[in-house]
């Protein structure tokens, strides 16, 4: 019986179920099938990967962060922007203001309110509907021209504060105290003094915003005729400009120190908040590190 089984297995080209045997080792038989399967799988999955990436990009741009092109010179030299220049691209954080309100010194991107009729830039609308579709698409992805109703400025005062210009040293004042504004840029040929304006008490839920290029910025001082019409509703704020992402030579965070801290004399306990937060965060980090080191030592084999 054993001889019959050996003879059948060696000479019969078919297995017990009648299927023809293939030559070669199992490894050799599997290689071409595996390659073919991988190739087919890749090309089938590629469109899914592309669509997923685009959907994620749109969701990130809509809810988390978006890249904006700086359209004008109003924020020089903090942010570069001018006709024919390699304008800065900034990453605008859309999450921070869901948990807190904009603060003085923040550089914010916002939708221009109704009284703001003097746009800093204009986007040429293409006459070709196909070109218009692609312009909207790339704008949604953060690579196209930004919407002409969006502005970027620095917060100077918030709701309830009274802002005016200027004191004897030509400084903006908030609640009667002059601000320290090291970011101000005096564009050559436009003078080194700010135009004065009467005191304005910013309505609650609004912001008073101005450009760092103080004499070349259409901001709260003049938009809508100035005064209360120049204030921007907090609800119009899209997000906080955090970092310059392009061009590579300009990679850096954006200066956003509060100009009122020194001028208005923030309480000492507030000035110590960063240090206190650092110490508070240090303890759990050190404790976690010690526990991790202990676990690693326990798992090491004894020599």
Image: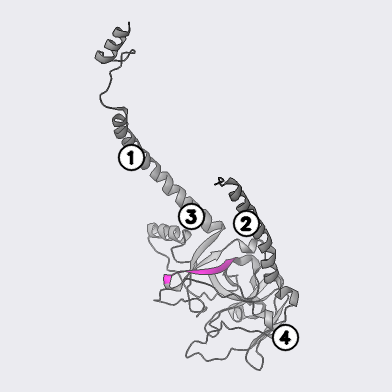
**Could you tell which of marks 4 and 2 lies nearer the N-terminus?**
4
Is label 4 in a helix, a strand or a loop? Answer: loop
Marks 3,2: beta carbons within 8 A? no
96, 147: nearer the viewer: 96
For residue 57, the mark is: 3
Asked whether 239 falls inside the magenta stretch, the response is yes
* Any part of residue 247 in sight: no
**Could you tell which of marks 3 and 1 lies nearer the N-terminus?**
1
Question: Pointer 2: residues within 10 angstroms few (<14), some, or many (20+)?
Answer: few
Is label 3 in a helix, a strand or a loop? Answer: helix
**Could you tell which of marks 3 and 4 lies nearer the N-terminus?**
3
What residue sits right under mark 2 in the picture? 289
Measured in 3D between alpha carbons, the distance from the residue under mark 4 to the one under mark 2, in whole angstroms, is 49 Å
Magenta part of the protein: which range?
238-248
What residue sits right under mark 4 in the picture? 176
Q: Position of residue 54 (x, y in %)?
A: 45, 52
* Any part of residue 270 in sight: yes
Marks 4,2: beta carbons within 8 A? no
What residue sits right under mark 1 in the picture? 39
Q: Position of residue 119 (x, y in %)?
A: 52, 74
For residue 201, the mark is: none
Residue at 65% across / 72% down in the picture?
103
Residue at 56% across / 58% down in the picture?
64
């Amino acid at each position: 019986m054993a001889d019959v089984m050996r003879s059948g297995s060696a000479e019969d080209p078919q297995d017990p179920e009648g299927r023809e045997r293939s030559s070669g080792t199992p490894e050799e038989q599997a290689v071409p099938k595996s390659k073919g399967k991988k190739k087919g799988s890749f090309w089938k999955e590629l469109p899914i990967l592309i669509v997923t990436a685009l959907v994620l990009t749109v969701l990130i741009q809509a809810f988390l962060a978006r890249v904006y092109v700086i359209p004008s010179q109003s924020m020089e030299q903090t942010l570069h922007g001018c006709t024919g220049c390699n304008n800065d691209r900034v990453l605008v954080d859309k999450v921070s203001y869901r948990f807190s309100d904009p603060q003085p010194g923040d550089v914010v991107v916002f939708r221009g309110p109704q009284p703001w009729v003097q746009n800093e830039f204009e986007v040429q609308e293409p006459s070709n509907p196909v070109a218009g579709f692609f312009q909207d698409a790339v704008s949604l992805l953060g690579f196209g021209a930004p919407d002409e109703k969006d502005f970027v400025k620095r917060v100077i005062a918030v709701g309830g504060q009274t802002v005016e210009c200027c004191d004897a040293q030509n400084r903006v004042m908030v609640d009667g105290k002059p601000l320290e504004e090291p970011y101000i840029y005096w564009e050559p040929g436009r003078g080194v003094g700010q135009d004065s304006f009467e005191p304005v008490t910013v309505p609650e839920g609004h912001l008073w915003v101005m450009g760092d290029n103080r004499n070349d910025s259409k901001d709260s001082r003049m938009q809508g005729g100035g005064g209360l019409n120049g204030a921007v509703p907090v609800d119009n704020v899209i997000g906080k400009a955090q970092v310059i992402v392009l061009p590579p030579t300009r990679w850096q965070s954006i200066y956003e120190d509060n100009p009122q801290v020194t001028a208005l004399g923030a309480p000492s306990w507030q000035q110590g908040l960063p240090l206190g937060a650092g110490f508070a965060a240090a303890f759990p980090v050190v404790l976690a590190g010690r526990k991790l080191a202990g676990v690693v030592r326990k798992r090491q084999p004894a020599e």
